[in-house]
Amino acid sequence: MKVLYFAWVRERIGKAEEVIDPPSAVQTVGDLIGWLTTRGEEYAHAFETPKVIRTAIDQMHVRPDAAIAGAREIAFFPPMTGG
């Protein structure tokens, strides 16, 4: 699946996107964030406060307990404000 990173999540990880193949035990967005944090210091830093990270699966906002099975694209971004 393709993973996109935006704003300071992208800055901390050092890339805008990547294609990943998480282990089968990774079933939800929360699981995916947990797994990503094991991939290196930059990921651990980006996801150090998972409660503030927003997620979209195939361009639809989802909660951390959302299943990732069948997702083509998952995007992670910090909270946004309008203006």
Image (tube, helix red, strand yellow):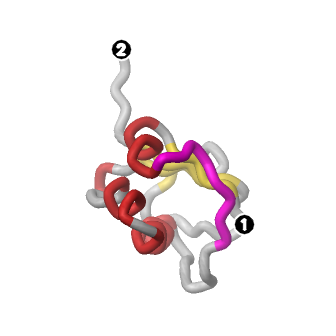
Vertical side of 8 occupied by 48: above or below: below
For badge 1, the amino acid type reads Gly
- What residue does disc 2 label? 83
Q: Quadrant of the C terminus?
A: top left
Q: Nearer the viewer, residue 59 or 53?
A: 53
Q: Quadrant of the N terminus?
A: bottom right
Judge whether residue 25 can be spotted in this image.
Answer: yes
Q: Main secondary structure of the magenta part?
A: loop
Q: Nearer the viewer, residue 37 or 27?
A: 37
Secondary structure state at the residue bearing disc 1: loop
At x 56%, y 85%, the residue is 25
Left or right: residue 5 compared with residue 49: right
As for residue 53 lying within the magenta part, the answer is no
- What residue does disc 1 label? 70
For badge 2, the amino acid type reads Gly
**Tags 2 and 1 in contact by the CB under 8 Å rule?**
no
Report the disc number at residue 11: none
Left or right: residue 49 compared with residue 28: left
Secondary structure state at the residue bearing disc 2: loop
Q: For residue 24, what is the image quadrant?
A: bottom right
Tell me the CA gap for discs 2 and 1.
Answer: 34 Å
At x 48%, y 47%, the residue is 14
Q: How many marks?
A: 2
Q: Nearer the viewer, residue 36 or 74?
A: 36
Query: Sequence order check: which comes first, mark 2 or mark 1?
Result: 1
Q: Which residues are magenta?
A: 14-21
As drawn, the residue found furthest toward the bottom would be 25
Vertical side of 21 occupied by 81: above or below: above
